[in-house]
Image (cartoon, rainbow, N blue to C red):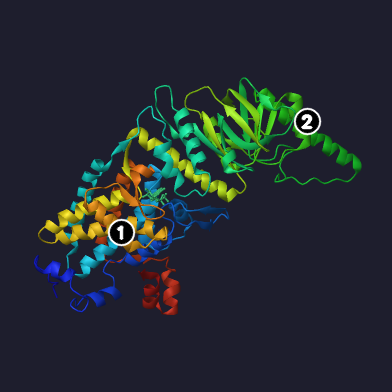
Amino acid sequence: MQKRVPSVQELPKRLWPGPEENPRSSRGRQQPLLKSMTAVQTLASIIRSCYGPHGRQKLLVAANGETVCTGHAAAILRALQLEHPAAQFVREAAQTQVENSGDGTAFVVLLTEALLEQAEHLLQAGLPHTQLREAYGMAMAEVLTTLPALAIRSLGPLEDPSWALHSVVNTHSLFHTNHLTKLVAHVCWASKGPDGSFKPERIGVCLLRGGTLEDSCILPGLAMSGKTCGQMTEVLTGARVALFHCSFGPTSLNAPAVARFSSPTDLANFRKGSDEALERQVAQLTTAGINVVAVWGKVDIKALILADKHGIMVIEAQSRKEMVYLSEVLGIPLLSYLLPPREPGKCKKVYKQEVGDSNAVVFEWEHADAPVLTLVLRGPTTEGLRGAQQAVYQGIDAYFQLCQDPRLLPGAGATEMALARMLSDKGSKMEGPNGPAFLAFARALRCCPKILAENAGLVVSRVMAQMNGIHQTGNFVIGVGAEGIINVAQEGVWDTLMTKAQGFRAVAEVVMQLMTVDEIVVARKTPSPASVESKGHLSSEKKKYLRKY
Ligand SMILES: Nc1ncnc2c1ncn2[C@@H]1O[C@H](COP(=O)(O)OP(=O)(O)OP(=O)(O)O)[C@@H](O)[C@H]1O
């Protein structure tokens, strides 16, 4: 039977009657028309409590066993093992957002959910998919056109960026945020090239356990956590580096040979032989011009004595990630045998640096593309340091965005509220199905300030009513603070225009796509037809392996 499309006059009536007057409402609630609705709602319910500066943190244990305490949506999404394809799809969009702009992950997930919820409501009321998509597309275009007009501040080319980065760095950090924001601003500013260009890869971030976040500092070049082992603690000119992820000592225990001894002389000869081999290996490094060796593994005392004899500086690294990064910067491989690399990694100098009671090793280069500064983060726990590291990366990414487009929007939900007001004004004057769709879009946008208020423990209805009242007067710098509504311009809460615009585009793409899906069919790995047929259950097996959500 063909579905009847409601007339233009009929649709608004269907959208706003009481529950008893809407014959489809109760039926619709049991069976969502948008098949991705439940999965997206579940995903959003995980992220919701982390949104904004009063959001909660999650203690995550990733699949590799690494623990991190974070409120960053990107880290939470990364740790989730999602099975539902729609949830995976939303996660991918949110991850693309964070890869492109470093921020706005939660925004993408939460606004997607809110828009789908509103779309579901309109579909239940009988609005055809095609018309809904078209109207949502028009509303999104209005949002993207209006957005630049709301950007009332911009970062000057010679201005200290601390004020602009404060809310980005501050959102998920618990302590000493001013100090951290100042460090991020300083490191970004000072690493700019002579032509004023800014490259995030010119900044290193090093985590050093010990002290507090207040003890964090900036070092020149690339600093890594680790200690120098022998007498050589610095190479101040022409450093030639080799990197190893094996022990710095006799040939690895993984070697296939098994030594068999029948007398003490055999043992003495074997020892002499392996000592000679080790001496040859260290001498080979010197011949290849290596004078600095960084090792992700144990440092053997005999090998260290030989290294000292040959004037090689030996560094015992403490983080594999830092070794991988160093290998990328130097352009040399991480070797698993004690052999010289084909080409040594070159840098100007390498030296030991004490930071409080911890040790770091600094690499400095002369060429322009190498890291020029490292922000060294201090703190008592690795989990806390990882959270601070994420805040630092978000700050660096935000500065990168501001170098491309310096415009900033009022934060704390003020921009979303202003856009909602604009769409409501337009929608209420529109004829036909576009009107309800614009109003639904506006309701979805209000989810952002609503969640901020919820997470701050405020009375949501009161805050929203106050905010709405002031926005109606044309004052669009009113957002949600810790104790109620705030003037974001006075409080200095800003979001970058680029991040917000990219976020809206990402949401548009996901929502439009998910609205077209009428069924989600997942093909499971099927057993071979022979084995299934032999059991005589082909049809039921087929059903089992072709699962519908
Ligand atoms: N001090 C503050 N007071 C009020 N609102 C703030 C403050 N700092 C940040 N915000 C607001 O919090 C919102 C951003 O929250 P959050 O950082 O949790 O979301 P996100 O950027 O989408 O996600 P993520 O940072 O996890 O990628 C923005 O609207 C921002 O303006």
Identify the mark at residue 28; answer none if there is no mark: none
Mark sitting earlier along the chain (1/2): 2
Residue 512 position by quadrant: bottom left
In the image, residue 211 sits, relative to residue 463, either above or below, namely above
The residue pinned by badge 1 equals 464
The residue positioned farthest toward the right in the image shown: 264
In front of the other: 413 or 101: 413
Report whether 143 appears left or right of 488.
Answer: left
Residue 544, given in percent of the width and then of the height, sits at 40, 73
Position of residue 136 in the picture relative to residue 66 (left or right): left
Image coordinates of residue 349 in percent, x first then y, are 61, 24
Check disc 1 and report its element: helix, strand or loop. Answer: helix
Q: Which residue was labeled with disc 2?
A: 305
Q: Look at label 2 and name its amino acid.
A: Ile
Q: Nearer the viewer, residue 290 or 388?
A: 388
Residue name at image x 20 percent, y 53 percent:
423
Callout 2 environment at 10 Å: few (<14), some (14 to 19), or many (20+)? some
Query: In terms of secondary structure, where does tag 2 sit?
Result: helix
66 over 11 or under it: above or below: above
* Quadrant of the drawing holding the C terminus: bottom left
Q: Is mark 1 within 8 Å of ligand 1?
A: no
Q: Please report contact status of discs 1 and 2: CB closer than 8 Å, yes or no.
A: no
The quadrant of the rendering that contains the N terminus is bottom left
The count of marks equals 2
Residue 450 in percent (x, y) is at 34, 59
